[in-house]
Image (spheres, helix red, strand yellow):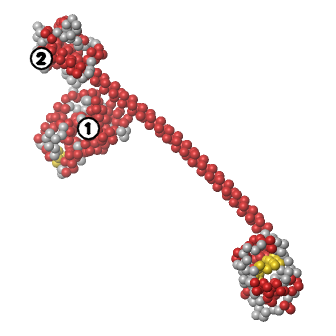
Amino acid sequence: MKQTKNQNSYECKLNYFVCTSLCATKQSYKYIDKVYNSNKKKYANYSKECAYYNLANSRLLEEELYYKKTLGIITSGEKKEFYYILRMTYKKANLLVKNSNNIVRLSELSIKPNTVSLEELLGNYAATIILAQSENKKLDEDDFFFIAFQEMVKLRTNPLVQSILKYTYIDKDRKKKLKQIETDLCDKYPNITKGLNELYMQKEDGSLDFEKLNDYQRIAYALDFVYELEGLNIIPLLNNKPNSTSHEICELINIWINCNGQVDPLNYDVLYSYIIVATKLRRLLETYKDAKKIYFRDIADKDKLLEQDALVNKILQEKHDLEAKFNKTKSDLEKKNEELKEKIRLLENKNKQLEEEITLEPSIKDELAELRNLMFNLSNCEDTTPTNNDVDINKLNNLNAICIGGNDSWINSMKEVLPNWVFIACGVEHFDTALLKNKDYLFVNTVSNTHSMYYKAVENKDKNTKIRYINALNRDRVLYEMENSL
């Protein structure tokens, strides 16, 4: 039901019809809210621009609210959302359309009489027609229920035509007649424009003189007590708009005449009583409409406040997210800074280590050379065993040397010829490293030794201490290798 279409077209009338049915069917409210709340501002604007918007005033308060929401959804042209509301609200109508082949018949709608309200029943009929058209299925236009429903649509859409009861639409001759009656009434009953009963019907103490009342006046007064029964004071409502205009009184007289009410110039009491009651009812309805306006204005203000709150919350959330991001970035940078500091420290230590290794390079080269000699000697062992006569024992004994490795018996044998030397037997892991200090040579027995002793000796020797390796247990062979390694 877009605004570009003729509001008197059948489609527009049918959409208006289903709109009035939906707003009077409470089970539709949650589906209407789901769609409407997805974009309140858009649907509200569409609703206000619709030619049928003011017809919402004829609905009850809650119905008016959902009438306007539904009207906005329908006039937005978003058929998918509109069909969703129809399918979820009128499930039997949706089921009928789904199960029908090419032709849909309203008479096949499975709703028993008096099991649902009239509005829900009519809403199912309207939904069946709309959903069938959405799926390109034909409707049986000869079906009795379809024909009857079309008449119902015409009756329902009568309010779309301006009410002929308004003074503006009354013809001139009728206006002249109504004006004369209104003048006569005002002359006879001066308080009629105020909607008040005449004072002559009251006693001196202000109470009613029931003996002076006819049946019609008695009905009018009795209705006043209904207001009191509901705790409502009608006087402030009358004072809210003190005097009825001539046009308003003429409109009420016109309604009376249209209902075949008698207008007897000799006895206006019946007409007068009707106008008094009608005026009070009119003021009550005007107040109700004013209250609805205030209600919807408050809703609009509330929605604006909610939008503002949502915007403020969004800004606060963005601020919170930015602060969290800033703090995380700051924390990451601090962590990265600490990591870089640690890397610098490690690099400085590594640099220091490398500098020390460079300083120790000659001794390392010397150690490697001795290891190569050891490997060469292992692969080129001589078959003959040398004797002490081939070795300068005194020269060896006078060396400032220490030897690690070998068993006790081997060490005792070596001490016989090298009494000035320091020997540490294999397995003495916790030897005093001070024994390594100020030595010119460190001899390592590779035949009987442990890794831990070897590394301990190498790591704790003096920088200038030379390492030599021996790979034999025969004393003469050992002495020979020692001398050759010098």
Image quadrant in which you'd find residue 61? top left
How far apart marks 1 and 2 lie (CA) works out to: 39 Å
Q: Nearer the viewer, residue 140 or 194?
A: 194
Work out whether 474 lies above or below 71.
Answer: below
Does 71 sit left or right of 351 as displayed? left
* Residue 237, numbered label: none
Residue at 20% across / 31% down in the picture? Answer: 157
Q: Residues within 10 Å of mark 2 (few under 14, many from 20)?
A: some
Q: Mark 2: which secondary structure?
A: loop
276 versus 410 height, above or below = above
Q: Are marks 1 and 2 in contact (CB under 8 Å)?
A: no
Task: Please provide percent x and percent y for residue 262.
Answer: 11, 15
Q: Who is closer to the viewer here, 478 or 265?
A: 478
User: Which residue is denoted by mark 2 in the rendering?
Assistant: 261
Q: Is residue 450 visible?
A: yes
Query: Could you say which is closer to the camera, residue 208 or residue 244?
Result: 208
Q: Position of residue 226 (x, y in %)?
A: 21, 21
Q: Position of residue 12 (x, y in %)?
A: 24, 35
Which mark is nearer the camera, 1 or 2?
A: 1
Earlier residue among tags 1 and 2 = 1
Indicate the amino acid at tag 2: Gly
Instruction: Check disc 1 and report the residue beneath it.
Output: 26
* Residue located 63% across and 50% down the image: 334
Q: Amino acid at mark 1?
A: Lys
| Above or below, comparing residue 359 to residue 40 in the picture | below
Q: Secondary structure at mark 1?
A: helix
Query: Which residue in the rendered view is the most extreme toward the bottom?
Result: 384
On the question of residue 55 being in view, the answer is no
